[in-house]
Image (tube, rainbow, N blue to C red):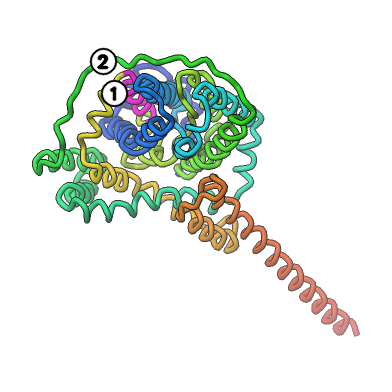
């Protein structure tokens, strides 16, 4: 696939409204919508659970949802249009899971202070370019295996969804593959439409009680404590960078783009800092939902998939402004439908990452074996020390790669020395 599509040199000339209008497509806008829908249907529930356990009131919870939605939307919209790449930005899902267990141990103002510290540390790490350099040093098959390991569980969950709701989820999956055959550009939105219609016809969709009202953000004055910084800031920074930003950059690279890690990660970190007083715990590059916007289902032309990222950003802003209403809408849709929709939308991204994982052209068989180890660890979902599996997947794969590379390097050196000695002996005999 093309690296940044070589059209990036012309992108400055194309950064005009008529060019954007010409790049608009139903498939790209639908991909952006589905990416946001998946974020609200799954990861948003983790935030709600964390808020309930921490004893936050309704206004604080609504402000938290507003902050992560609007913050993610603004950054995703701006960066997608600026870079002409499908930049999907969201909140830290492993960070939300972390807060499920620790948020109630601190005053909320202390948690907000810890969010600010984590954002500042992330900004320093991003501006230095250190994270991007570390990522570039890891062989591509290992990074592709991390991505495959992150995506695989979501695709596997489709089977359970089909068994639990065969009419809705099964009909959605069938509609997707029929769409891939008849109208590949619109297979994903077509499948979503079929799934919604089937859920309505079967009575599995509930009637939501809606009240259309703008969400009012609540400003919390941060306070700082060593305990909150150590208990929230440090682990939040680790899981966000390793579990979200890393796979997010890998997704873009394996999709054929050359992301500017300093620009993207710095933009996300700045948003984390600005929206922290309103309850946002961390804003970062998305990995799972990014696969929906980076794949061929968003648009056959990779140079026009940035519309999917921009659309996702716009939908995030819209949903954030009316977050309470949108959450009620998604609560009415069967959970199995969202699971099945996410799985089929990520099939293309999973296929691409698996192909990259098994490509040994530039790294040899050692990278393939290391990539398999990475895939196993990442897909396992383990989280020792509160650090999510993608981090351990990269660590384990890199360690295996180093061991195999060193061992095979020594074997090659020994074989070369033996061959050189043999050649020397033959040469001596010939001279005699």
Identified at 27% across, 55% down, the residue is 159
Quarter-of-image position of residue 307: top left
Callout 2–callout 1 Cβ contact below 8 Å: yes
Query: If you read the primary sequence from the N terminus, does the residue marked by circle 2 or circle 1 appear first?
Result: 2
Vertical placement of residue 122 versus 17, above or below: below
Residue 32 point in image, percent of width and height: 33, 32
Residue 232 point in image, percent of width and height: 56, 33
In the rendering, which numbered label is found on residue 72? none
Q: Main secondary structure of the magenta part?
A: helix
Name the residue beneath numbered marker 2.
Answer: 213
Vertical placement of residue 90 versus 219, above or below: below
In the rendering, which numbered label is found on residue 324? 1
Identified at 65% across, 36% down, the residue is 130
Vertical placement of residue 328 versus 253, above or below: above
Q: Give the left or right position of residue 300, taking residue 262 as reference.
A: left
Q: Nearer the viewer, residue 20 or 400?
A: 400
Q: Which residues are magenta?
A: 309-321
Q: Nearer the viewer, residue 194 or 17?
A: 194
- Spatial CA span between label 2 and label 1: 8 Å
317 in the magenta segment: yes
Helix, strand or loop for disc 2: loop
């Amino acid at each position: 696939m093309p690296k940044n599509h070589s059209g990036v040199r012309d992108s400055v000339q194309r950064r005009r409204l008529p060019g954007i209008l010409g790049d608009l497509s139903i498939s790209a806008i639908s991909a952006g919508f589905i990416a946001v829908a998946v974020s609200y249907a799954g990861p948003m529930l983790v935030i709600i659970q964390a808020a309930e356990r921490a004893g936050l009131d309704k206004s604080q919870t609504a402000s938290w949802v507003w902050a992560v939605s609007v913050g993610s939307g603004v950054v995703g919209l701006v960066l997608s249009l600026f870079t002409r790449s499908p930049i999907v930005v969201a909140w830290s899902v492993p960070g939300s899971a972390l807060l499920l267990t620790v948020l109630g141990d601190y005053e909320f103002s202390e948690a907000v202070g810890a969010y600010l510290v984590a954002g500042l540390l992330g900004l320093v790490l991003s501006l230095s370019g250190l994270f991007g350099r570390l990522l570039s040093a890891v062989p591509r098959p290992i990074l592709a295996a991390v991505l495959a390991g992150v995506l695989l569980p979501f695709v596997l969950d489709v089977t359970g969804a089909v068994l639990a709701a065969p009419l809705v989820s099964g009909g959605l999956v069938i509609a997707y593959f029929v769409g891939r055959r008849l109208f590949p550009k619109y297979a994903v939105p077509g499948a979503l439409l079929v799934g919604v219609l089937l859920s309505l016809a079967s009575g599995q969709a509930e009637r939501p009680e809606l009240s259309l009202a703008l969400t009012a953000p609540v400003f919390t004055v941060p306070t700082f404590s060593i305990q909150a910084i150590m208990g929230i800031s440090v682990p939040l920074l680790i899981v966000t960078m390793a579990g979200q930003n890393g796979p997010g950059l890998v997704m873009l690279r394996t999709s054929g783009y050359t992301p500017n890690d300093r620009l993207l990660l710095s933009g996300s970190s700045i948003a984390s800092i600005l929206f922290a007083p309103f309850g946002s715990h961390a804003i970062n590059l998305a990995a799972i939902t990014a696969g929906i916007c980076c794949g061929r289902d968003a648009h056959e032309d990779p140079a026009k998939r940035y519309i999917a990222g921009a659309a996702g950003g716009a939908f995030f802003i819209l949903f954030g402004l009316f977050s309470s209403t949108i959450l009620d809408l998604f609560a009415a849709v069967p959970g199995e439908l969202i699971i099945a929709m996410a799985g089929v939308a990520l099939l293309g991204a999973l296929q691409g990452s698996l192909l990259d994982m098994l490509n040994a052209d530039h790294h040899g068989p050692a990278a393939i074996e290391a990539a398999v180890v990475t895939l196993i660890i990442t897909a396992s979902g383990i989280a020792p020390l509160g650090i999510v599996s993608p981090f351990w997947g990269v660590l384990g794969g890199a360690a295996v790669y180093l061991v195999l590379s060193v061992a095979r390097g020594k074997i090659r050196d020994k074989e070369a020395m033996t061959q050189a000695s043999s050649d020397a002996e033959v040469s001596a005999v010939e001279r005699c």
